[in-house]
Image (spheres, coloured by chain):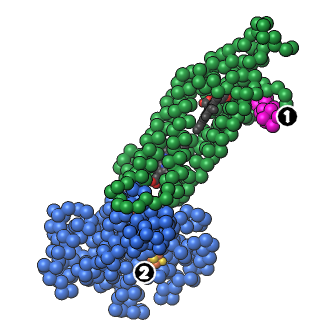
Chain colours: A green, B blue
Amino acid sequence: MSVNSYESHSEPSVYVYEAPMRIWHWTNALAIVVLSITGYFIGSPMPSLSGEASDHYLMGYIRFIHFSAGYILGVAFVLRIYWFFVGNSVSREIFFHNILKRSYWSELWHEVKWYMFLVKEPKLYKGHNPLAILSMFWLFLLPVIFMIFSGFALYGEGTLPGSWANTLFSSWMIPLFGGNSFTLHTWHHVTMWIIIIFVMIHIYVAVREDIMSRQSIISSMISGWRNFKDDGKVEDIKDDDR
Amino acid sequence: MTETFYEVMRRQGISRRSFLKYCSLTAAALGLGPEFAGKIAHAMETKPRIPILWLHGLECTCCSESFIRSAHPLAKDVILSMISLDYDDTIMAAAGTQAEAIIEETIKKYDGNFILAVEGNAPLNQDGMSCIIAGKPFQEQLDHVAKHCKAIISWGSCASYGCVQAAHPNPTKAVPTHKAIKTNKPIIKVPGCPPIAEVMTAVITYILTFEKFPELDRQGRPKMFYSQRIHDKCYRRPHFDAGQFVEKFDDEGARRGYCLYKVGCKGPTTYNACSTIRWNEGTSFPIQAGHGCMAVLKMVSGIKAHGMPD
Ligand code: HEM
Ligand code: HEM
Ligand code: SF4
Ligand code: SF4
């Protein structure tokens, strides 16, 4: 059926991303961009500046921005966990995927084929699709938790024993990595690249889905509303207990 | 009654003036504040001397070499007069059967009341054949003495963590002190390859005067020397914060003494006191000489972390 612009048709909408979710998403995204750039320059500093040390404070500022963004990331994440308990069902989605459920895998497979241009029609989802959940869990959630723990453990080395960061994080994170802070640095660094890979895929998919799928994507993370573009029947929309 | 420390020192020809100087020096090195100089002096004057048995396993003797080069000649003399009287096969006068007899004598006289200092470590494979002392595996000697001592000092990375001998594949199964002995004795680790001389003398003095270990960190090292990174107290740190780095070892930055981070300095991840106490009578340390920190200490604990059999 072709949609005649003169004819009225229905575009059902559902409210999916509550305000705290959206605020968290963009705060988190911004913090990660800042952390990755500054973190990269902590690992591989910019070309040396000349002159007197008292004329510059470049590394100092880079590290200060890294730590500030680190605090923001950490606090935002704690609030996000709070929202896990009080938010709607979508706010819990990225924390679980029921791998024991048959339909999870078949839907995941369908989604993979959809991303490879092998099927013509995507399924409709109120929240995230199964593939999104898989990648958000393994490539975002776990790495970001590790980044916060390892980040504050490294931070606690600078604030010295007795400081809260040292007591809460360094005291057990560093022994966990063989008592060797260098090993922890390396993992903190490598995990950045895991998150960057996630972000690249994530943004590609968000833009692609915004164009190609049957539902609004990017605007949903801004307004909170998900619009279904075609004459989608509300019953088709998947919103189950994955 | 056994002699006090002070009496031993006087007998060794150390004047009272030198003795007091030494006490204040040590108080300062331990970060204890001036009022402790008197306490140390008092302890040394009244407490009977605690003997130390210093055993050598698989090692390169750099710990002993470092120790006898303690910055202040006084410290060296004083400490040596306190310990060399007993057993240290490298620097003692006695040798052979005579020397070994001292161990048994000390155990008999001071059972449960002497300090065991260990340099190097014990190989366990091939029945301990890779390190034989007086015809017996070092492991046996170590275990025997450990059973009777009051507490143990693990000198250097060998005794603390394993060091080079314990690196993969570790054919002799060299293990650090705490894994070689069968008894459960308090152990203080003073890692480094070697540890800084002043750190060694200060640790001994602390234990002897206060009859307890200084506060230890979670790895069993004295906090006062191992709780900060080289980077936290490095004199090139302003250049790090400014973003001024040596890019190549012969560039302008190297001549101007910029930070060595980009040429591989391990200061940011290494816990030791080199940047404050320095080496060779406070003359210098690797970073001051223009080379980054090499973190021998940390490398060694890294070896421990990767595939050291327990
Ligand atoms: C560092 C960058 C970013 C990170 C780490 C990130 C992370 C995330 C995470 C974890 C979610 C799941 C939210 C939840 O349910 O808890 C999400 C959703 C989303 N993000 Fe991002 N994001 C980033 C940047 C972006 C950008 C630049 C865009 C826009 C182009 C974007 C668009 C979206 C959209 C549209 C969703 C909802 C997806 C859906 O409905 O399935 N994100 N993002
Ligand atoms: C997604 C989040 C993060 C990314 C991508 C990131 C990235 C990086 C990178 C690449 C480094 C350099 C590591 C090296 O090569 O030695 C670094 C260092 C560091 N990061 Fe992060 N980081 C993140 C989160 C955090 C958080 C939450 C904190 C907590 C405050 C933190 C604190 C630190 C500290 C203290 C250092 C060491 C700085 C130094 O040695 O001067 N990071 N980070
Ligand atoms: S700790 Fe390392 S340095 Fe000291 S004796 Fe052993 S090999 Fe030499
Ligand atoms: S030279 Fe090494 S220890 Fe000193 S500031 Fe630079 S990185 Fe840190």
- The dot on residue A187 is none
Which residue sits at x=42%, y=75%?
Answer: B194
Position of the N terminus of chain A, as image quadrant, is top right
Q: Is residue A184 magenta?
A: no
Which residue sits at x=35%, y=59%?
Answer: A53
- Classified by dominant secondary structure, the portion drawn in magenta counts as helix
Secondary structure state at the residue bearing disc 2: helix
Chain holding disc 1: A
Tell me the mark number nearer the camera, choosing from 1 and 2: 1
Residue hosting label 2:
B62
Pick out the residue farthest to the left.
B17
Q: Is residue A109 magenta?
A: yes
Which residue sits at x=56%, y=82%?
Answer: B130
The response on whether ligand 3 sits within 8 Å of label 2 is yes
Please tell me which residue lies in front, A129 or A118.
A118
Residue A32 shows in the view: yes
Position of the C terminus of chain A, as image quadrant, is top right
Amino acid carrying mark 2 in the image: Cys
Chain holding disc 2: B
Which residue sits at x=26%, y=68%?
Answer: B29
Would you call the spot at circle 2 few (<14 residues within 10 Å), some (14-19), or many (20 or more)? Answer: some
Q: Which residues are magenta?
A: A103-118
Residue B43 shows in the view: no
Please tell me which residue lies in front, B280 or B122.
B280
Instruction: Find residue B22 and report its image quarter.
Output: bottom left
User: Does residue A39 lie above or below A52 as drawn?
Assistant: above
> How many numbered discs?
2
**Left or right of A61 on screen, residue A10:** right
Residue hosting label 1:
A118
